[in-house]
Image: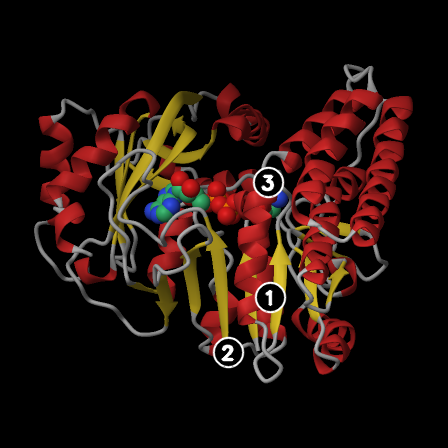
Amino acid sequence: MRVMKFGGTSVGSGSAIAQTVSILSAAHQPDKPVIAVVSAMSGVTNLLLGAAEDAAHGRLVDTSDLRHQLLDRHLVAAAETIRDARLRQEAATAVAALADQCLRLVESVQVLGDLSPRVNDWIVSFGERMSSRLVAAVLQDRGVPAEAVDADQVIITDGVFGAASPLFDRTREAATARLRPLLDRGVLPVVTGYFGADESGATTTLGRGGSDFSAAVIGSALDAEEIIIWTDVDGVMTADPRLVPEASTLPAVSFAEATELAYFGAKVIHPRTMQLPAERGIPIWIRNTFRPDHPGTRIGPEPVENGAVKAITAIPGLSVITVEGAGLLSVAGVTARVFSAVARVGINVFMISQASSQHSLSFVVRGADARAAVRVLEEEFELDLLRARLLRVWEDPDLAIVAVVGAGMRGTPGVAGRVFQALGAEGINIVSIAQGSSELNISCVIAAADVARAVPALHRAFELGRTVR
Ligand code: ADP
Ligand code: ASP
Ligand code: MG
């Protein structure tokens, strides 16, 4: 059995869905079944999140406009792809019923003026609920027995709204109970990506870009032979092709490298996707829906050694928080207090550095989390600040991390030197530096405005466009 996940652009229009469906119908064989996992049509998740937010703040006035925006995309795609009139009508009815259910939720947020994480997750799940109906109907129109499946019945989670983790054993039971009978009957399940449900049945999302993770969870739960992530680029590339047009596709990367690349900004795969397949040795392929002849990238267990550095990544929109004071580290447990305070409010820390003078400690967070980080540290160290033992806590905004990633750089001297040289030659100032203890990456904090120059400069310095192909 194989799991095939199709991202937002792969289901983003009638012609994209036609392409997706032709890949699925060619792959689905009686002796080699396929489970599809689909994202919402591109832009729909953002539309729903924006509507929920606007409703909560009294900014959404016209829900009929929202209804049109939601429905039009799906109905136009249905009209373009479903030839059988009855199937087309059924799909339109199903999608409209979902849109109406979603709108009732948005309206209730509007009335209450309050948006809980639980209702937010429920509202935003409708993008995938709608796209899965559409894709299943197009498959049926092509003569492939298919059924849309809501993942609330497949992925059982710990109930952390917005960033849920699957409970693996419960998920294995639920996924087997819901999906095996369909596979046994030769039906191709089209499962919604991005979310599952907690044990009480409340919808919980897995985080933005989480449909990749959904495919990995389902593939691992049902012992798939492989997991194929179909997207809009040829695979994992040496850099984001939007920043570096000459970036090339990597034929293979290891699970650890893919995780590192994803964590440091390669949006092509969600960072949590690799963990479960890596534990089970299930390979993951990244392939291009619009160029199905291209082999794509294989993410697998073997260490793949082709050159020290594989790829350059970037995470924009970051801030550095610095806690500074004379004799800072002589205050017992300061480091522990800093990070437990930040963890208490659920803020993710990307990178940490500490000056050897012991006078300051800095760490990198998302810009959106910076104010909360400063506030919680000022609270935590209120007494120390009063006694002037800790002098200051502040934010440096508008920063980014650029990272140079690859398992082959372990034990390869001179990688850091080349990074500094390349950035220095471009006149780019490095705010701080870290090398992961696994030696899979070197990351530098720079100004966000320098990312567009830094990534191509590093890509050239390591000759990535030429050597890996
Ligand atoms: P999907 O909707 O299919 O999940 P995403 O937009 O989430 O697709 O991810 C694909 C995008 O990731 C590409 O269009 C590309 O611009 C971006 N990307 C960033 N870094 C990389 C990289 N190293 N290799 C390939 N794509 C990358
Ligand atoms: N639709 C969701 C998002 O936009 C999940 C995904 O596409 O992976 O974040
Ligand atoms: Mg994605």
In the image, is residue 454 above or below residue 343? above
Q: Which of marks 1 and 2 is in front?
A: 2
Q: Is mark 1 on a helix, strand or loop?
A: helix
Q: Is mark 2 on a helix, strand or loop?
A: loop
Query: Residue 79 in the image: x percent, y percent?
Result: 71, 41
Q: Residue at x 33, y 59 (%)?
A: 257
Taking the image as four quarters, which one is ligand 2 found in?
Answer: top right
Query: Residue 434 in the image: x percent, y percent?
Result: 27, 44
- The residue to which callout 3 is attached is 13
Amino acid at pointer 2: Glu
Q: Which of marks 3 and 2 is in front?
A: 3
Q: Do the residues labelled 3 and 2 touch (CB within 8 Å)?
A: no
Q: Mark 1 Cα within 10 Å, few/some/many (few <14, many 20+)?
A: many
Q: Residue at x 62, y 41 (%)?
A: 41
Q: Mark 2 Cα within 10 Å, few/some/many (few <14, many 20+)?
A: some
In front here: 357 or 394? 394
Cα–Cα span, label 3 and label 1: 27 Å
Look at the image and tell me whether residue 445 can be seen: yes
Cα–Cα span, label 3 and label 2: 29 Å
**From the viewer's perspective, is 356 left or right of 320?**
left
- The residue to which callout 2 is attached is 225
Cα–Cα span, label 1 and label 2: 13 Å
Quarter assignment of residue 68: top right
In front here: 239 or 30? 30
Q: Nearer the viewer, mark 3 or mark 1?
A: 3
**From the viewer's perspective, is 196 left or right of 419?**
right
Amino acid at pointer 1: Val
Query: Residue 113 in the image: x percent, y percent?
Result: 85, 22
- The residue to which callout 1 is attached is 217
Q: Quadrant of the C terminus?
A: bottom left
In front here: 37 or 318? 37
